[in-house]
Image: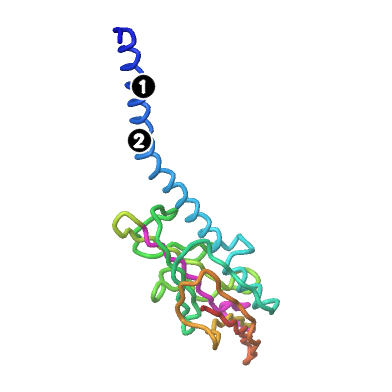
Amino acid sequence: MNSKAVSTVIAAALIVAIALGLTSTAYIWGTPLIEKRQEASVTERVYNQFLQTNQNSLPKIIEDVANNRGVRSFTIGTNGAWVLNANEDSIEFTFTSKTSNVAANMQNPISLTPGVQCTGQQNSPSPAVGVLGQDSSSVVCVSATTVGDTFEIKYKIWFRELVDNPFSPTQKFKIDLEKDPTGLDRSSSKTIKITFGESVTSGTLITKKILILLI
């Protein structure tokens, strides 16, 4: 084999080696970036599913069932854990992600509900009572905590009492979350079922009982 042929072979081998090296480098650096973008997309999707400006968000679906009765289902966009606390009329969802779109490791959860802070007892809404026709029954609080190289993100929906006049109320309204008799207090299922139970009037207070089915 003459020197020209040898040079051609060597040049071809170098080109292949360089191409493989570039491909390997692109894979090593590109894969984590792609995965992070995918997780960011999931994180944003879950955020929108709790945002009260979204009529298909969980707080709005529960309010819709309370106002219009019936049965509705809600499916979250990722794996995680649900906890229903009927005593405080709250439901929360926790999941992990490599990205967070809210500030992490804050002293108190961040409120997604205008005019409300998550600074009450056990990070409950403050003020604890809203105004009928002005405020929403639901208050959404979100927190993010770093756990190693990931974030543990928790959304919690509280339901508070609404009154027509904070100083001298003559009409009150409350959404009361209750565990469906066939369901659980905790679940890792993606789908939950929301059912209208009954409307109870006691004095000036109207309470809409909502059954939450976790399976």
Q: Where, by quadrant of the figure, is residue 211 drawn? A: bottom right
Tell me if residue 22 comes above or below residue 33 in the rendering: above
Magenta: main secondary structure equals: strand
Tell me if mark 1 has few (under 14), some (14-19) or many (20+) residues whose alpha carbon lies within 10 angstroms of its own. Answer: few
Q: What amino acid type is highlighted by mark number 2?
A: Ser
The location of residue 107, given as percent across then percent down, is: 34, 63
The location of residue 36, given as percent across then percent down, is: 42, 48
What whole-number distance in Å separates the C-alpha atoms at marks 2 and 1? 14 Å
The location of residue 109, given as percent across then percent down, is: 41, 64
Q: Where, by quadrant of the figure, is residue 131 drawn? A: bottom right
Could you say whether the residue bearing mark 1 is in a helix, strand or loop? helix
Residue, far bottom: 202
Residue closer to the observer: 109 or 91: 91
Dividing the image into 4 quarters, which one contains the N terminus?
A: top left
Judging by the rendered image, the residue that carries numbered circle 1 is 15
- Asked if the residue under mark 1 is in contact with the one under mark 2, i.e. CB atoms within 8 Å, the reply is no
Residue closer to the observer: 186 or 49: 186
**In percent of the image, x 65 and y 87: which residue is there?**
198
Judging by the rendered image, the residue that carries numbered circle 2 is 24
- Is residue 102 found inside the magenta-colored segment of the image? no
Residue closer to the observer: 100 or 187: 187
Tell me if residue 56 comes above or below residue 159 in the rendering: above
**In percent of the image, x 37 and y 27: which residue is there?**
19
Q: Where, by quadrant of the figure, is residue 213 drawn? A: bottom right
- Is residue 162 found inside the magenta-colored segment of the image? yes
The residue range painted magenta reads 151-170
Tell me if residue 46 comes above or below residue 184 in the rendering: above
**In percent of the image, x 63 and y 80: which residue is there?**
195
